Image: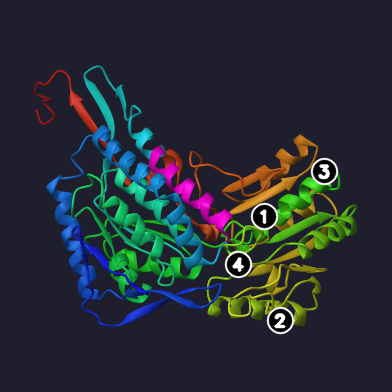
Amino acid sequence: MTQNLKLYINGEWVDSSNPEMQDILNPANQEVIAKAPKATKEETKEAIKIAKKAFESGVWSDRTPQERAEVLLQIAVKMEENLDELAQLEMRNNGKTLREARSDAADAANTFRYYAGLLNHPDGVTYQATGDLQTMIVKEPMGVAGLIVPWNFPLLMSVWKIAPALAAGNSIILKPAEITPITAVKVFELMDQTDLPKGVAYLLMGSGSIVGQVIAESDDVDIVSFTGSTGVGRNIMQAATGNLKKVSLELGGKSPNIIFDDADLETAVDYALFGIFMGAGQVCSSGSRIFVQEGVYEEFIEKYVERAKRIKVGLGNEESSQMGAIVSEKHMESILEYIQIGKEEGAHLACGGNRILRDGLEKGFFIEPTVFTDVTSDMRIVREEIFGPVVVIQKFKDEAEAIRIANDTEFGLAGAVFSKDQNRAMRIIKKVRAGITWVNAYHLTNVQAPWGGYKQSGIGRSLGTFGLDEYQETKQININLDPKPIHFFE
């Protein structure tokens, strides 16, 4: 039976006044697995209004860090008790493999645990500026946080925003992606079973042009945090100028993966596959541009293509599947269009390039792992974010050329270097203009480290102490230790 989802407003699950519902599909077989409401402008504005009142009441914002930490731990425990269900829901709604969904669910629960622990650490700074002036630097919650998440990591991206925003003491309004709201609904169901006060957290499903726009424009929203495309991020930034609210953006990427001729080739090939084909390439930090030094270029391509052809694309619930479905038909068609563009631009299609219509996958949105070689930096498939299982491999001569072509992009989210020469690796990685980088690895990260990019890959950082800072105001308090007349005007 298809589930009819509801909005979560002021601690209650409610239907939208808009009778129109959106079919939520399993991208592996196009089965309708739920129907989602489409919140109206009026419902969004009302939710923001109530969230602001809840913040001003102090029901959550005035709680001590230790009290907030206890609630975050309750949420973490609830998630840990429901990891299997969260993983299954994520797999069915997003199309990723079950092993990826399990990892996401575990990481999401751990994120709540991390921020609960962070709240129990000493915070703030105090110093004596002059003989009679004691200065304190304290952190305070911002107010109402609008959280807009993408479809590629519906569960994990939601939690990356919810956990620090709540930890800081804010009220929150979450808008999941229109096509992948199911795990967000489950997270709110679990939060509803904890001691989180009613009226602090809101879940609004609906279109970005309505719900997202109202959140970005509202004078009662104090910060909007968005993860998604650079184009939409730019629109949100413009909409947020009304009250000059804080904007935190994690946007697109076209990340370089640089492989020198002295690298351990087996390791480099393995991570380069993981760097692009994990999540079917629908990952903002994917290593979608591989640069190989000319001495091992041909050998690398031979090994890489042979391995790419062996990747098992399949249904997410099959344990043998190594790569799952594309999230939607619309996005699949966009990826296939880019593949055709690559062919027309003169790049060599070394493998893949087709939709998979076999082995029980014909009803779903599946694309073969696709590798282009003999590319040049001016090609669209090299410059534009494809956001799918498509990688381009380009040759370089020396360190100077590697740095030049790696940084020849409007993006700056991630990057990697593979070399046995640690000095060279550090020289190069320090020159790569990106916020998330690796040496002899790719995609490995943790909740303690900041996540975000340079240039048009965004503004601000998620995770770690930086992620908590995103949702806090910084205040200085000056205390006069010897109060007496200053005689300034005498």
| Residue visible at 37% across and 47% down in the picture | 470
Is residue 287 left or right of 474 when viewed as pictured? right
List x then y, in percent, for residue 311: 73, 62
Is residue 257 left or right of 23 when viewed as pictured? right
Task: Check residue 275 in the rendering and tell me which mark sits there, or answer none.
Answer: 1
Instruction: Tell me whether the residue at label 1 lies in contact with that at label 2, contact meaning CB atoms closer than 8 angstroms.
Output: no
Mark 3 = which residue? 264
List x then y, in percent, for residue 290: 74, 58
Quadrant containing the N terminus is: bottom left
List x then y, in percent, for residue 396: 82, 57
Marks 4 and 3 sit apart, C-alpha to C-alpha, by 33 Å
Disc 4, SS: loop
Q: Amino acid at mark 3?
A: Asp
Disc 2, SS: helix
Q: Amino acid at mark 4?
A: Leu
Mark 4 = which residue? 315
Q: Front-most of 288 and 406?
A: 288
- For label 2, the crowd category at 10 Å Cα-Cα, with few meaning under 14, some 14 to 19 and many 20 or more, is some
Q: Nearer the viewer, mark 1 or mark 4?
A: 4
Is residue 313 left or right of 148 when viewed as pictured? right
Task: Check residue 472 in the rendering and tell me which mark sits there, or answer none.
Answer: none
Marks 1 and 4 sit apart, C-alpha to C-alpha, by 21 Å
